[in-house]
Amino acid sequence: MPVIDDPNLLVGLDRADDAGVYKLSDELAIIQTIDFITPIVDDPYTFGQIAAANALSDVYAMGGRPLTAMNVVCFPIKSQDISVLGDILRGGWDKMQEAGVTLMGGHSVEDDELKYGLSVTGVVHPSKIITKGGAKVGDKLLLTKPLGTGLVSTALKGGVAEKKTVDRVAWVMATLNKTASELMLEAGCHACTDITGFGLLGHASGMVEDSPLGMEIRISSIPFFPEAKEFAQIGLVPAGTYRNREFRTDMIETASEISDEMLNILFDAQTSGGLLISVPSDKGEELLQNLHRHGVNEASIIGEILAEPQGKIVIRE
């Protein structure tokens, strides 16, 4: 793609980030993003909630506030009852209402594979944009949701996951990153990205890639669904997780023996995952306590930003 020469394009194609940002005035910029997914749970209403939360997350990761959205629908009208689509859209609508987002319309096409998501527009002050590239040496890294949603979703498709496991994971995926975003801004965070299809290590790599920074992550501090490890052990691993490992392995250094199952969790392709937040060292514990007080109960400090090895992530037990 050609480089776009526009002084008002603050975050665009030349800087791979969670969303695009365009300045309208010295006081206002818009954030634009689009995301849609295939069903990862059986219940249509829950799927609609998850898909909406997933699409809204990019705006929260950029430190913005989502304002409006458009539905994006691909629906197999010849093989699915239209009531299924109604339940999906109702789930998405309810999640948008929770986020304070106005639905303006949307677009639908007939497709053999069901897909749903949102095109979202948000706002942010031009000087307060949070990107994945702003981390500083000494920063603490916080993760706000547990890992393993891809592994559990794969187990669900294979008929292995128990209902209580699926229900818990679905609730986590449907939870907005709104509160976490607001609290990280109060703490003066330096950088952020949300954990989705590239997995924790894939998205974390984007924070230090081609930079003078390194990163350390401690496995013992990472929240994950216990069942995810069990599913990884029996080989119920999404194809996207294997692709993530292949693509980013050269950026990973292990300082201790890491099991194959744990690496699959660290690279697991997530849907509507948590925020990975880089915050000043003296604010890390305070932010963690605030997250817990406001219901982000599984947030954890999982590592820190280092001066070296540059462009690498060191994993310790």
Image (tube, helix red, strand yellow):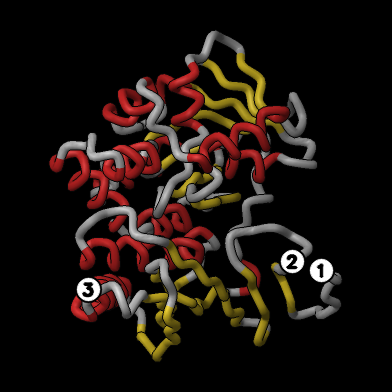
> Could you tell me residue 226's position as x and y percent?
28, 27
Q: Nearer the viewer, mark 1 or mark 2?
A: 1
Q: Residues within 10 Å of mark 1 (few under 14, many from 20)?
A: few
In three-dimensional space, the C-alpha distance between marks 1 and 3, rounded to whole angstroms, equals: 38 Å
User: Which residue corresponds to the image point at 48% horizontal and 43% vertical from the top-left?
Assistant: 269
Task: Name the disc covering residue 193, or none.
Answer: none
- In the rendered image, the vertical position of residue 36 relative to residue 8, given as above or below: above
253 and 277: which one is in front? 253
Task: Name the disc covering residue 1, or none.
Answer: 1
In three-dimensional space, the C-alpha distance between marks 2 and 3, rounded to whole angstroms, equals: 36 Å
| Residue on which disc 3 sits | 84
In three-dimensional space, the C-alpha distance between marks 1 and 2, rounded to whole angstroms, equals: 8 Å
Give left or right: position of 298 versus 110: left
Which numbered disc flags the more N-terminal residue, 1 or 2? 1
Marks 2 and 3 close (CB-CB < 8 Å): no
Per the image, label 1 sits on a secondary structure element best described as loop
Per the image, label 2 sits on a secondary structure element best described as loop
63 and 84: which one is in front? 84
- In the rendered image, the vertical position of residue 154 relative to residue 100, given as above or below: above
Which numbered disc flags the more N-terminal residue, 1 or 3? 1
Asked if residue 69 shows in the view, the reply is no
> Could you tell me residue 85's position as x and y percent?
26, 77
> Could you tell me residue 76's position as x and y percent?
36, 75
| Residue on which disc 2 sits | 13
The amino acid on which the numbered mark 1 sits, given as a three-letter code, is: Met
| Location of residue 98 by image quarter | bottom left
109 and 141: which one is in front? 109
Which numbered disc flags the more N-terminal residue, 2 or 3? 2
User: Which residue corresponds to the image point at 61% horizontal and 16% vertical from the top-left?
Assistant: 254
| Location of residue 310 by image quarter | top right
Q: Residues within 10 Å of mark 3 (few under 14, many from 20)?
A: some
Extreme residue in the bottom direction: 104
